[in-house]
Image (cartoon, rainbow, N blue to C red):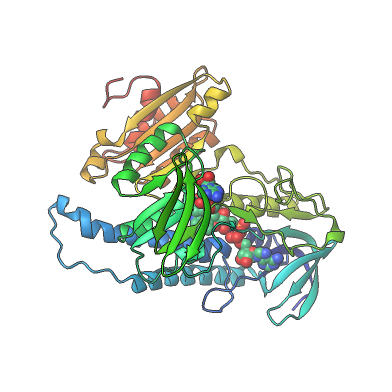
Amino acid sequence: MSNTYDVIVIGAGPAGYVAAIRCAQLGMHTAVVDDFVFKDGEPALGGTCLNVGCIPSKALLDSSEQYHKVAHTLAAHGIKTKGVELDVKAMIARKDQVVKDLTGGIRQLFKANHVEWLHGHGKLVGQGAVEVRGADGETRRIEGGAVILAPGSRSVDIGAAPLDHERIVNSDGALEFTEVPKRLGIIGAGVIGLEMGSVWSRLGSKVVLLEAQDELLAPVDRQVVRVAQKEFKNQGLDIRLGCRVTGTKVGKQVSVHYEDKEGKQNLQVDRLIVCVGRRPNTEDLFVDDVGLILDERGFVHVDEQCRTNLPNVYAVGDVVRGPMLAHKGQEEGMMVAEIIAGQYGHVNYDTIPWVIYTHPEIAWVGRTEQQLKAANVPYHTGVFNFAATGRARAMDESAGLVKLIAHAETDQLLGAHIIGPQASELIAEAVVTMEFGGAAEDLARTVHAHPTLSEAVHEAALAVGKRAIHKAN
Ligand code: FAD
Ligand code: NAD
């Protein structure tokens, strides 16, 4: 075991493990310090994303969607089902296995690339110096030519609803219910609230979401949100806006006190999920003497290329500004590895796609119509409903639309907003077009297979020039 490395990475989530693999590919002797322990007590790589974030939530979203389809929607296809049963424990066990397989995969990749994994807590203690504290409390000092900080983020707690990890939980706990709560309360109707609310609602919970803001999903294009609100309502998600939670009382059930514009309210639920955002993990990450600068919101301060104020110390992923998304962290990890190796690295922050994995899925990239209007940028929009595509109809998935926004003078694609089937996959076409500086016309003149969902993207591009074929322009 060595004590000196070319690069030391703190954190093995998507930002850190990708940075480490790329460093190793570029010939650098690399160590990763990570302190995550899976619920079975085993140290695991992959961070929040693989263990308690993206992957387990998508596994449950998929299982719950399969259940909901079999129990409620197959009849429309002429398939009769009887005696459909739910085994929540088996569903959770499958989710855990998916996680184990994938985190084991990162372990294999580390081995194959000769990345050294040091299980323990890492702390920057000096120029290129990291102290690693093992589970037994033993510490060891290692030195690196460069250090990459990738410690990720954790859930924000609120005083009005302290977690007891039984009745009141955060997103970690929401992935572990072993039975379906009859009544489920959720504080925060953001990305996690809507995804976890969808999971448990499909499995039979009566779900109420209490959202502080007066509008749902404030960063999302309003036309898309209007469709989402209608669909979520039809699914039975009770989303209450403009709510201020003032307190909770836990007994056999949870009593949630909140205020809205009508006054004081009370909600009784069996379980309550608190998901009001995440904050960067900077506690115990560095000794004060090293002089690492945090920004005014507590994130590690970095420039466009993820350099901190300290020489040869970089920071990537959720601990720095920008969206808290796994793919954003991965790209930053690759960029930094290439810069350390003396190459050119870059992340285009204007083309980072977002996806919310509800049903229908919501995906977007670039600017919304509201942002362009506020910035006085002249634009044209092209909108096409999935209901007018043969494939969506055949799938019985006709809710939703594709909306493309292009510059009024240059036709350059400025934003794409999709709500509908496979929106998570369809958005990639718009991302690539925008990355290449392409125009709506480029998409309009590109052949799309028939019958596919991507025809909705093609028709939306045609609609920007008022020449969609399967709708009146
Ligand atoms: P993390 O994944 O948080 O990893 C950081 C790692 O560093 C952890 O293992 C942590 O234990 C370790 N660590 C922290 N401090 C130290 C230290 N001092 N020493 C040693 N180790 C340390 N994003 C998406 O793009 N798509 C999704 O579908 C998605 N779904 C999500 C669902 C949920 C429920 C949640 C909670 C998040 C989801 N996210 C999703 C967000 C995504 O998980 C994060 O953006 C991503 O994990 C951030 O990666 P990271 O590498 O910066 O940090
Ligand atoms: P979020 O920022 O998406 O949503 C939090 C919501 O809670 C907001 O709507 C906010 O207005 C509301 N809120 C804040 N304080 C409140 C209060 N006191 N009472 C009621 N509502 C309150 O945060 P999140 O849902 O916790 O997710 C955290 C982050 O994790 C996301 O922003 C995203 O970056 C990442 N994530 C991504 C995905 C994905 O990519 N599909 C999925 C899950 C999480």
Nearest to the observer: residue 253 or residue 208: 253
Q: Quadrant of the N terminus?
A: bottom right
Q: Quadrant of the C terminus?
A: top left
Q: Position of residue 151 (x, y in %)?
A: 66, 61
Q: Is residue 273 above or below residue 223?
A: below
Q: Position of residue 382 (x, y in %)?
A: 39, 26
Drawn side of residue 467 relative to residue 311, left or right: left
Question: Which residue is found at the position 67% from the left and 54% from the top?
Answer: 319
Question: Which residue is found at the position 39% from the left and 52% from the top?
Answer: 208
Q: Is residue 74 above or below residue 211?
A: below
Q: Is residue 194 visible?
A: no
Drawn side of residue 90 relative to residue 328, left or right: left
Q: Quadrant of residue 467?
A: top left
Q: Position of residue 378 (x, y in %)?
A: 52, 18
Q: Quadrant of residue 205?
A: bottom left
Q: Is residue 67 visible?
A: yes
Q: Is residue 468 above or below residue 301?
A: above
Nearest to the observer: residue 449 or residue 61: 61
Q: Position of residue 273 (x, y in %)?
A: 47, 59
Furthest residue in direction front, as rendered: 264
Number of numbered markers: 0
Furthest residue in direction top, as rendered: 409
Question: Which residue is found at the position 22% from the left and 60% from the top?
Answer: 71
Nearest to the observer: residue 53 or residue 316: 53
Drawn side of residue 60 relative to residue 315, left or right: left
